[in-house]
């Protein structure tokens, strides 16, 4: 038996994963254990979990691999300072002490941290380092259902690369082309995230959700920032940006180009201007991704595309690539960001460095991304009893029937079943569920349960067999990473008066038979559900369909704004008691909010730092 521990850490979304004989056994993000969103620290808890799940001590693990190369990152820092000097001294001086103290000697740092897991772990000779973008590319290709694929990765920045093209075949994977820092699609998108008043490295999905409320009237101005070639390659005009040398993303020239200062989220509301800015950067991002896809399809003649890196979480752009029919098949790594780097680094070591054969699964090799913690019925009941919860325990059939009944009566349900998801999306294991037919559900879930901005859209979980009856797409989308439009026969067209409403006011217009999951542009971020990856969830949606005729339920992550997705039964109960959720269904236990002690209610609104 051969085992590899993969680690990503020290930037954001730290995580750990373990392979046994090349099989992905377990993977989890550190944030789920520490309850600190995007936790960048050494993943002590995540490593403990994956080792325990694989029934291994650290001293029994054959290799340990880190997801990037710190020396190359340091080289970029130095060369960037030299290239821009004397500008950038402040950010350079801020970064130096940490590099000199810790990051340059990361092998030593890792070894000292790893020793805390197991006193019998004695030598650092089994610690290896992967390349950041190779880790991303490997996380996308090796678990994919393809023998051969072209792999596109795009994010902020790794060591030097920001965008790469690789070709994967069987157990080999080779990076063919790179775009280097400071030219970065991820950092361009983050610059607009910052400019519209959202938090960089976590608010990008808000910008994407805001875009359909606006019109891309600033598209030409966005393109003034970029030298964009027909093949999708690009260079950013650095005179508008501050990220290479300063402590902010953009500068005064950027503000002057668009005509407003950076939005202060504490003092300034989102206006039509910000919606139009969001629509403009989203449109340009889609154009770049489509042009890159077309050029690599033409150049390599390979029919399959794999995507990873933070930009691959832009499900709207992914949907556009799919719609253009550039590739026959697309597969996107569900943990596309840095967390997935832990997995990619381990897979790259196993296949590329060690030359081990690859067995391709016709679905994929991610186990539905259900790779995290799980709790048996005894453990669930024990935690609920300690928390003081009032619950009843039902048979499986009664549990499914009762939950479907709650949903059909427009109740908001916390749903906690099986293994926790790996990656940023809840996929029916740690989810909050609702009735998509309700025209109040989206607003209620946002404001009363999630405590977040009302414009944020929700995703439909749909039975795979019923997908094309409701949406204009017919491909698997198990990881909620593709956006498609609702079919015309399910739409409710807006009248002229409704079309002229100001941005957020469009939210209250019923646009389809399933308004809770239909965005203002008639799009939905789809999750397809099959029996073989998540039987519980498939059974629940099937029962809801039996009761209502609708094979779809609202799915959003089980957390409030600023909080990581719940990990344990205790986390789930705390979130249940701190929100206006009506029911909690956890294992075979059902909790009714009205039957809980009022003393256990929590004020969740100030519990977590808002993202």
Image: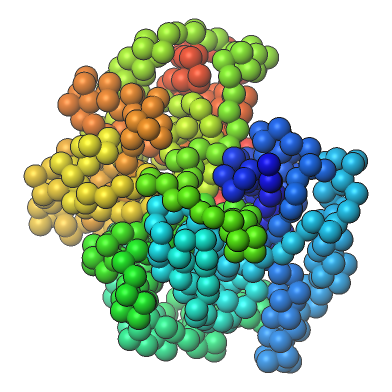
Q: Position of residue 168 (x, y in %)?
A: 47, 66
Residue 103 figure quarter:
bottom right
Q: Quadrant of residue 280?
A: bottom left
Q: Measured along the vertical axis of the image, is residue 463 above or below residue 573?
A: below
Residue 391 x/y as whole percent: 52, 10
Using the image, determine if residue 352 lies above or below residue 24: below
- Residue visible at 37% across and 47% down in the picture: 362
- The residue lying at 67 percent from left, 36 percent from top is 54
For residue 528, say whether it is visible: yes
Residue nearest the viewer, comparing 219 with 59:
59
Q: Is residue 334 left or right of residue 39?
A: left
**Residue for point 86% across, 72% down:** 100
Residue 199 shown left or right of residue 538 in the figure = right
Residue 563 in sight here = no
**285 sits to left or right of 326:** right
Q: In which image quadrant can residue 381 be found?
A: top right
Q: Along the horizontal axis of the image, is 598 left or right of 501?
A: right
Instruction: Pinpoint residue 60: horizontal percent, then vertical percent.
Output: 79, 42
């Amino acid at each position: 038996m051969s085992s590899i521990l993969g680690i990503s850490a020290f930037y954001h979304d730290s995580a750990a994963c373990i392979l046994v004989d090349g099989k992905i056994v377990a993977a989890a993000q550190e944030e789920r254990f520490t309850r600190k969103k995007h936790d960048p620290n050494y993943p002590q808890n995540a490593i403990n979990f994956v080792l325990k799940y694989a029934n291994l001590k650290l001293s029994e693990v054959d290799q340990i691999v880190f997801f990037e190369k710190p020396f190359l990152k340091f080289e970029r820092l130095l060369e960037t300072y030299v290239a821009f000097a004397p500008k950038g001294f402040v950010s350079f001086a801020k970064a130096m002490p940490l590099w000199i103290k810790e990051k340059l000697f990361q092998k030593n740092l890792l070894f000292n941290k790893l020793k805390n897991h197991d006193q019998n772990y004695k030598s650092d000779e089994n610690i290896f380092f992967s390349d950041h973008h190779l880790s991303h590319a490997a996380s996308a290709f090796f678990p994919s259902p393809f023998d051969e694929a072209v792999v596109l990765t795009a994010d902020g920045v790794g060591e030097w690369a920001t965008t790469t093209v690789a070709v994967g075949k069987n157990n080999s994977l080779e990076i063919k082309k790179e775009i280097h820092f400071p030219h970065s699609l991820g950092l361009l998108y983050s610059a607009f995230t910052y400019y519209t008043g959202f938090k960089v490295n976590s608010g990008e999905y808000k910008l994407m959700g805001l875009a359909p409320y606006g019109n891309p009237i600033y598209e030409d101005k966005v393109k003034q920032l970029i030298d964009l070639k027909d093949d999708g390659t690009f260079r950013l005009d650095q005179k508008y940006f501050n990220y290479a040398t300063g402590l902010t993303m953009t500068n005064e020239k950027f503000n002057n180009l668009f005509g407003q200062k950076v939005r202060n989220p504490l003092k300034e509301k989102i206006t039509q201007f910000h919606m139009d800015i969001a629509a403009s950067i989203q449109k340009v991002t889609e154009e770049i991704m489509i042009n890159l896809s077309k050029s690599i399809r033409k150049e390599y003649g390979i029919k399959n595309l794999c995507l990873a890196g933070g930009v691959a979480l832009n499900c709207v752009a992914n949907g556009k690539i799919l719609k253009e029919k550039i590739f026959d098949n697309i597969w996107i790594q569900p943990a596309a960001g840095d967390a997935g780097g832990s997995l990619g680094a381990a897979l790259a070591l196993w296949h590329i460095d060690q030359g081990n054969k690859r067995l391709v699964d016709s679905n994929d090799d991610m186990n539905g991304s259900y790779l995290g913690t799980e709790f048996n019925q005894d453990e669930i009941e024990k935690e609920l009893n300690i928390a003081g919860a009032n619950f009843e325990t039902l048979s499986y059939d009664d549990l499914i029937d009762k939950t479907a009944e709650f949903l059909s009566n427009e109740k908001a349900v916390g749903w906690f079943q099986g293994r926790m998801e790996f990656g940023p999306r809840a996929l029916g294991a740690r989810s909050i569920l609702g009735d998509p037919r309700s025209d109040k559900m989206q607003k209620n879930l946002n404001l009363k349960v999630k405590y977040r901005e009302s414009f944020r859209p929700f995703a439909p979980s749909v039975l795979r067999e019923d997908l094309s009856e409701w949406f204009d797409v017919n491909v698997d989308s198990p990881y909620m990473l593709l956006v498609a439009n609702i079919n015309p026969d399910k739409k409710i067209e807006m009248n002229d008066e409704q079309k002229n409403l100001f941005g957020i006011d469009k939210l209250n217009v019923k646009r389809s038979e399933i308004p809770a999951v239909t965005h203002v542009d008639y799009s939905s971020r789809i999750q397809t559900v099959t029996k073989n990856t998540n039987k519980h969830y498939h059974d629940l949606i099937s029962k809801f369909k039996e009761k209502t005729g609708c094979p779809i339920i609202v799915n959003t992550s089980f957390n409030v704004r600023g909080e990581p997705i719940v990990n344990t039964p205790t986390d789930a109960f705390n979130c249940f008691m701190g929100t206006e959720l009506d029911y909690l269904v956890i294992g075979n236990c059902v909790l009714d909010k009205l039957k809980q002690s009022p003393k256990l209610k929590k004020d969740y609104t100030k519990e977590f730092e808002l993202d």
